[in-house]
Image: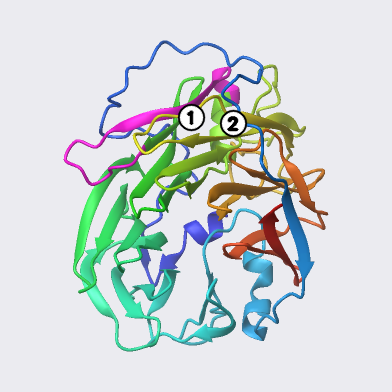
Amino acid sequence: MGSTACRMILGVLLATGCTSHEAAKPGTEPVVPRPAPAPTAPFTPTPEVAVAQCVLQAIAIDPPVLHRDLLAVAPQYFHPPHRGGFDAYRGGGRVFPWFDAYALQEPFIPPEDVRIAASTRSTLLAVSSDGELGVIARDGGAPTWLGERLYPEDAFETTAGMRWVLARSGSTWRLVQIDAGNRASVFDLKVPESTWDVRIALTADDRIAVAWLERDGGSLRVKLTLDPIASEPMVVDVDEVVLPEAVAALSQRSTVDLALAGDGPDGVAIAWRPLADAGYADVGDRGTPPQTPCGAEVRWLAVSSDGKPSGSPRRHSTLAHPLGGVSGIGPWGLTGNGMKATRIGGRAAFVWLDDGGVQGARVDHEAATVLATRESAPLIFLQREGQMLLLDSSPGVRAFSLGCE
């Protein structure tokens, strides 16, 4: 998804880290002691693995009719790595139509020279021509500019109307808190912008959670904080795999498709897809991309409200494939799986692409379920809780109702 993460706002380039994948080094050391890493062992179910109480289902429903301006940019956006909404600007003007999960049939038309980059149920996150972050009410009106040069990548809104925004600053990732009066507070997460896999989510009780990937040599770790705005936030390692350093670096630059969602009444759940073949040698270089598939696995687990993982991660074996056509100068990664997170029946659930189809797993499920056949390489778009769209660049759209029976 490099194109959407590297958008230039009329000369202001904020996404400086889209082609760099150095190890993430958060500024706050974990407060939980970490033993010396050991090679990742094969998965063995443990007694704490809960028996699934239901089976995920995806029932085909009539797809929505997408606006012609959205279909026109399908080749640009309808691909697995894309996240967020859709800027339907096609050149030749100063107006940038915006589509998101709340309005795929009709665009929001912002004022001239203002682009929308993220949204919540009530608010559109805008960027001015000089890179200033602002908010616009979904029902219209003039932007309220917040006095910060930040580029929003994701946003959530609490039941009380507080907005939380994950944003790029040009150096590190920032978390922006916007209150009901549109007053903003900015918190530096101290995670370098070169860290591609950074995600935020709200718990059911409206706490904000932040997760990101860190690589230290051959160790890949998922870091999590449930109190990111505290003066000394508690940062914990919730999952880790250990690989030869060259394979871990390839996994990092391939992205691990990190996904995060609220789980149960006050917890969160994470899923990610690291590479898993310690013997893989076709890592490529600056002139040649990897040419062969590499074994990988999707890993998912729940985390309680105090930041403690609830048991061992469940795992699903898969493959990461070569990119195909590439341009520029390497090294390059392998393909991702376009994983997205949602909630089904009060629990976190994850959906991703696999050679065997569109797969899904709720966090309390020991194994994945095939939800739909795979046609091409669609964008998994979770329009709302319980509804999944598969958007294809051809263009095309399939729609499904998700549930757990």
- Closest to the observer: 13 or 95? 95
Residue 194 in view (yes/no): no
Residue 250, numbered circle:
2
Tell me the SS state at disc 1.
loop
Q: Residues within 10 Å of mark 1 (few under 14, many from 20)?
A: some
Give the side of residue 108 with respect to residue 16, left or right: right
Segment colored magenta: 225-247
Q: How is the image coloured?
A: rainbow
Please provide percent x and percent y for residue 17: 42, 47
Please provide percent x and percent y for residue 360: 69, 47
Q: Can you identify the residue that label 1 sits on?
A: 310
Please provide percent x and percent y for residue 43: 65, 20
Q: Give residue 400's quadrant in the image.
A: bottom right
Mark 2 or 1, nearer chain start: 2
Tell me the SS state at disc 2.
helix
Residue 29 among magenta residues:
no
